[in-house]
Amino acid sequence: MTPTRCLRTSLWVAAVVLLATGCTSSTATGPTGPKNLNPQAQAKDNEPVSISNRAKLLFEDAVKAFDAQKKAKAFDYPSLDRKFKAALEADANIAEADYNLGVIAERQGKKDEAKTWYQSALKKKPSLRQASENLAVMAQNNGDIGGAVALYQDVLKRYPDDAQSRARLAEIYRQTGDHDRAMEFSRAALMREPQSTTALKVMMRSYLDRKQLAMAKLVALRALKLDENDPELHHTIGLILQQEGDADGARLQFKRALETREDYVPSHIVLAQLALEAEDYPGAEEHLRRILQAGAKSAAAHVNLGIAYKGQGQYDKAMQEYDAAEKLDPKVAAIYLNRAVILHQAKDAPERAVELYKKYIGMAGGDVALNAEAPVFNLLREAEAVIQAKNEAKAAEAQAKQMETLQAEQQKMLQAEEAKQKAAGGTAANAAGNAQAPQKAPPGEAGAADPAQGANEQKNPAQADSDEPADDFM
């Protein structure tokens, strides 16, 4: 939004720009920017303070850098942080520098640091009510409604005609469901400041809550004429168009909100959800990364980023995001469901998946009744079937190995028996052969044939052939 200029005192007629912060919640709006402060009212609270020329120059340089970055719609918060700190180092009395450092810290998600800077700005300059309003918004976004109301009421005591605090109180009434009081305070704010976009935002959201879409759109268009670069206006119009069923028109408005301020978290959240529903996982990843880069410590954002990674087949990255979500909030049931799906379908770990499916059913059943048709039950049955199939396959494999071992042992026994039989058959054959062969007496033994005798027998065949003894007579 357009930065406004504030005259500190007649001793310093210089440009003093307070950056406008925006809240990171979709249910509450941030300050639209400070208005010109009344020098007389300021002098009533503060004694005139002399600011060094060097500090003035450094502060003006930081403001010019902010203006340039705002025009380019690309903020370099670390560089702005250094510039405003340099102005403070030159002169610690510049309360507006403290305030702007608080806005820069808040934009980066550094809530505690932002709170410290706002409190420092108020100590130096109690009339800097924008710091009080931002502290109240932070309290409101953190659920400290009582603290926020006290801060707004304190501003109204000191500035009875302050429109901004009335608009903030109107938002609190809207959030608590008291739409009559919300509209009452919004109109009171507009009576004091007809161009209060904060009050108009409360009215259009109140109409949207009550499904009075035509009135909500009418108020939104009126506010858009006052500030067409307010991302919250485009975002709310997108919500209205969603309710009317104009999905394409709504998406364009959410993108328009990011064009006016690229780190506007509510629009990133909606666009990430739309991308997931359309299975545009790279698009969802881009928006979810921006949400986390903005400092959002959201378990849901990590879970959704894990889903986006899973959709792209990046399972290890997905598991890391589920781990990060569990560290932030272990009570988010979706962590265990999505982790189980990866273990079941991508990591071949159905046993662990079954444990996580059952854990999810137990946790989700406490918040949302799961009927028998819930997808998780089919997933559980599938994982259990996989486990049963694996067990049966293991049993069959073991049985096959056992049979193979048994067959091998039987084969060895058969081979051994065959070898034994062959050995026995060879022994018997040798024995039979020896029985049939002629027996030869060894030389020198009785009954052995004499070669000389054989020769003589051949010489006297008659004698050899006669069976009678030889006759002694001639």
Image (cartoon, helix red, strand yellow):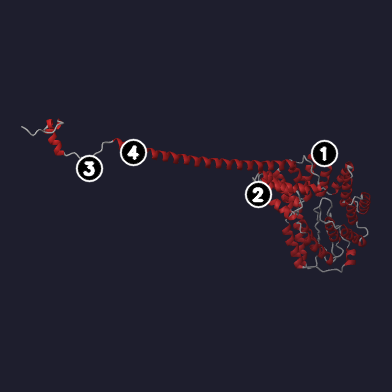
Between the residue at mark 2 and the residue at mark 3, the CA separation in whole angstroms equals 94 Å
Labels 1 and 2: the sequence-earlier one: 1
Residue 309 point in image, percent of width and height: 68, 46
Determine which quarter of the picture holds residue 417.
top left
Q: Secondary structure at mark 2?
A: helix
- The reply to whether dot 2 and dot 3 touch (C-beta < 8 Å) is no
The numbered dot on residue 431 is 4
Q: Nearer the viewer, residue 63 or 254?
A: 254
Nearer the observer: mark 4 or 2; the answer is 4
The numbered dot on residue 316 is 2
Q: Would residue 55 appear left or right of 446 to someone viewing this image?
A: right
Type of amino acid at the residue the image marks with label 4: Ala
Residue 190 point in image, percent of width and height: 92, 52
Q: Would residue 22 appear left or right of 154 to someone viewing this image?
A: left
Labels 1 and 3: the sequence-earlier one: 1
The numbered dot on residue 46 is none
Q: Nearer the viewer, residue 284 or 197?
A: 284
Between the residue at mark 1 and the residue at mark 3, the CA separation in whole angstroms equals 126 Å
Between the residue at mark 4 and the residue at mark 3, the CA separation in whole angstroms equals 21 Å
The numbered dot on residue 245 is 1
Between the residue at mark 4 and the residue at mark 2, the CA separation in whole angstroms equals 79 Å
One can see residue 229 in this view: no
Residue beneath disc 3: 442
Question: Looking at the image, is 81 positioned above or below residue 74?
Answer: below
Labels 4 and 3: the sequence-earlier one: 4
Between the residue at mark 4 and the residue at mark 1, the CA separation in whole angstroms equals 108 Å
One can see residue 273 in this view: yes
Nearer the observer: mark 2 or 3; the answer is 3
Labels 2 and 3: the sequence-earlier one: 2
Type of amino acid at the residue the image marks with label 1: Gly
Which residue is depicted at the point 82% across and 39% down?
245
Between the residue at mark 1 and the residue at mark 2, the CA separation in whole angstroms equals 37 Å
